[in-house]
Image (spheres, rainbow, N blue to C red):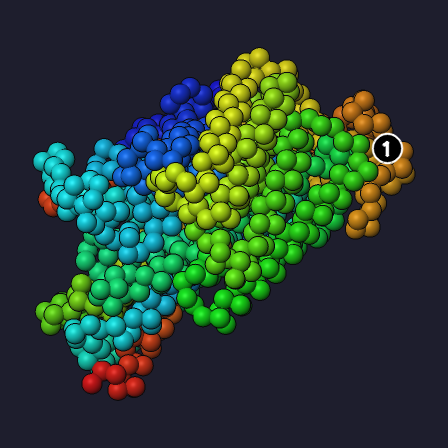
Amino acid sequence: MTVDVHSPESTADHGHHTSLGISNTKLAMWCFIGSECLFFGALISAYLIYINERADGPGAELFDIEFTSASTFILLMSSLSMVLALAGIQAGDMRRFRIWIVATGLMGSVFLAGQIYEFTVFLSEGANVTVSPFWSAFFLLTGFHGVHVAFGILMLIAAWASSLTGRLRMENAETIENLGLYWHFVDVVWILLFTLVYLIPALGGGGS
Amino acid sequence: MTTLAERPSASRSRSPFRRPLAETGLGSWFTTVDHKRIGILYFVSAMVFFVIGGVEALLIRLQLATPDGQVLTIDQYNQIFTMHGLTMVFFAVMPLGSAFFNYLLPLMIGARDVAFPRLNAFSYWVFLAAGLFIYSSVLLGGMPDGGWFGYAPLSLVGGDPLGYTIGDATTTQTIAGNTVAEGQRMVFYSLGLQIAGIASLASAVNFIVTILNMRAPGMTLMRMPVFVWMILIVSFLMLFAMPVIGVALWELMMDTSFGANFFDPAQGGDPVLWQHMFWLFGHPEVYILILPAFGIVSEILPVFSRKPLFGYTAIVFSGIAIGFIGWGVWAHHMFAVGLGPVANSAFGLSTMFIAVPTGIKIFNWIGTMWDGRLRLTTPMLFSIGLVAMFTIGGLSGVTHAVVPHNWQQTDTYYVVAHFHYVLFGGAIFGLMAGAYYWYPKATGRLMNERLGKAHFWIQLVGFNLTFAPHHILGLNGMPRRVATYEDGYGWNFWNLVSTVGAFVIALGVLVFIINLVISYKRGAEAGPDPWDARTVEWLTTSPPPPHNWDQVPNIRARDELWQRKYPTQGQREQVRVPAGGSGELEGDVAPGTTAPTEGTTGATQSPYTISDPGYDKGVRHDVHMPSPSYYPLIAAFGLPIAAYGVIFDQPAGFVFYAVGALLVLGGLFGWVLEPPTDPSAEVAHQ
Ligand SMILES: [Cu+2]
């Protein structure tokens, strides 16, 4: 074998080759997450600005706090299983890794199914993006979060599949660590959304 | 590198394509992941867009040359002034900056490529796809016509809701059997800029990681060339500004195409929210456009003044300060909106304050030239041109910060004068300086100096002839964005002067393009270091080999190459020059006379050898460079195809969505599944 001298990408999995000591892919993931903060920040701002712009349409009374609390709990638990999946691959226990990565994906899917169900309920009760700025902002904000969850699930499936074919091995544990960063970030955003969108209007009596 | 090993065995590859391995020939440009070739692609594409935007500018000036101009209809004028702004900002100046970032960043920090070469290729193709997408609107009902700022509610209803100029605004037309509403023009705007934003975001991540992580041994942050610092700051600005405009553009698209109510006041939406989001992106965008040029002149002025940069630390930290304060000034674009005296005062003060770090840079450049032995080459002339012209633009910018004064100027040609002094006199002059300065590095040949100087003087005169009169026109009340004006306001003379000036600029740019083309074959041989420069990109051959260096240089000083050429006598380490000191080194070799031969170790050694003392010659270092790939191109062109799904009615729209999504996802999967470096590719031997 030949010796590798600072060639790009080939150093990506070996953090100690880089100037900061953190691998390129992980640094890139942190940058991306920083950018995503502004992305959701802008969406949340629009939602908060329009929180009372309901025209004559329905408002937050359509929210079903119990239902959304349950799906929120499931999404949070998926963060736990993501941690366990990472621990599995780091320990080289690919069976354990696969169990937990599948569990993460399933819990993410349950959350997503819950969101789709919730959207269909809202639509049937006359709420859609054209009704009022409130609903425009609501659907764009929560919809984009759902897209992020869906993209995460795709990556989880890809990780699971490539561990079956042997492409993903213990040496690639950092790929899962990066995927985990993304997944936890999406969960944290949901905690924020759940609080701002669902809980605060309910606590303030805005829903009634 | 160009000789290839045997073909990959068919059983190995899981890709539907044979991996492209050619690194020469026309086809290789489509699959290249080499940062230098991507830089050249950016440069050529951006120059094409620059010429298109320039022709649009000439049409605008022809229309406004006389009162009651008849060159363009009002509808055409609205499209052309919008596209002039969009083209110059997003498809000329930003990608010209990217061209320099790509070509120079790895060379300046002593790396072999950027951190993610295929992502880099993806950025380029997405940028090109966005440009082609937005210009395809010419054939699909007209180009965007709501201004580059896209203010709601104008952007929602189209330029002519009552149908004064283009017939009934609600008319539709049939394209390929599908109904397309005329009101799609600003949909092209929102989708095209979203796609372009993806390109900027991807490059931002790539450049940040490259700068922070791929530096050569010894290249500490405070030894990095100022240009690299500016790339870092610009990348962070892009990283945080692009998602803000991305959300605003999504909301605009939801309004125009899906009946949402974000910005429609009739439904309770708030058009001012668009302005906030647009300018929260828009002001950092100004620095995204200008800081690369600042970085370029900070490289050029020391070389041709034969002095170290005056106050390196001050320039770096003022750049960082601009990067931070730039987020707190956006509402100076909105003083006339009615935000109230408190907000207006606060943003007026922050806007005055941001002039301070900008002023620091200008004094640093003057300090660099002060008492230097100036060589007035073309790159130096353009750099001095930037310092002078930007100062004028900066001063008129400070006048905008004074709120009552701003109310007088807002939406007049005074503002047009201001930002052209900043973006043409600043950004374009700086980028052209960079083109003359680094052309020999990229091509191995110098650009013609005589033509270069002619270009500079023609452009300087033409530029001032065009834009200085705008100050007067604006203060005399001429509103901007008007398609025509009546006789009798006293605006005729200066408008005519401005139009003449615009054609003088066009002549200058023509000379520039001719120079670029003829010097490629006929320019004088440059050698590795034609300017007697200071930074390490001049250490390697011109043009550099695909892997940049056989051995990555060890960096021991801020002006590493200068220190190798003119080592301080008796001292291995660079003497720390007090901030602001002239940095004249004792025993300095007379400038530009000889290529010194004494290396720091005392052995007879050219400073241009890429090997370092201490490099173990016993170890055989082979370099795996990333292999070319089809996937960035495939994934990138899926984006505009999916975007046509929004433009076209169903069912054709669904076909576009499906094909686009398939290309993007398929491209990404193929990308992930192929190794960065094909195992069968030849390695470059040391
Ligand atoms: Cu501004």
In the rendered image, residue B317, in percent from the top left (x then y), is placed at: 66, 55
Secondary element under disc 1, as helix, strand or loop, is loop
Q: Quadrant of residue B121?
A: top left
The residue lying at 36 percent from left, 62 percent from top is: B272
Q: Mark 1 is on which residue type? A: Asp
Q: Is residue B464 above or below residue B249?
A: above
Q: Is residue B460 visible?
A: yes
Q: Residue at x 74, y 49 (%)?
A: B311
Q: Estimate how packed mark 1 is, as few (under 14), some (14 to 19) or many (20 or more) residues with alpha carbons within 10 Å.
A: few
**In the image, B593: left or right of B50?**
right
Q: Is residue A25 left or right of residue B159?
A: right
Numbered marks: total: 1
Question: Which quadrant of the figure contains the C terminus of chain B?
Answer: top right
Query: B643 or B363: which is nearer to us?
Result: B363
Q: Is residue A33 visible?
A: no
Q: Against A156, is B497 above or below? A: above
Image x and y of residue B222, in percent: 69, 50
Quadrant of the rendered image containing residue A91: bottom left
Q: Position of residue A139 (x, y in %)?
A: 24, 65
Residue shown at 29%/71% (left/top)?
Answer: A50
Q: Is residue B625 left or right of residue B568?
A: left
Q: Which residue is mark 1?
A: B588
| Residue A18 against residue B271 in the figure, above or below | above
Which residue is farthest front? B488
Residue in front for this viewpoint, A112 or B432: B432
Mark 1, ligand 1, within 8 Å: the answer is no
**Closest to the observer, B440 or B93:** B93
* Coordinates of residue A129 in the picture (x, y in percent): 20, 63
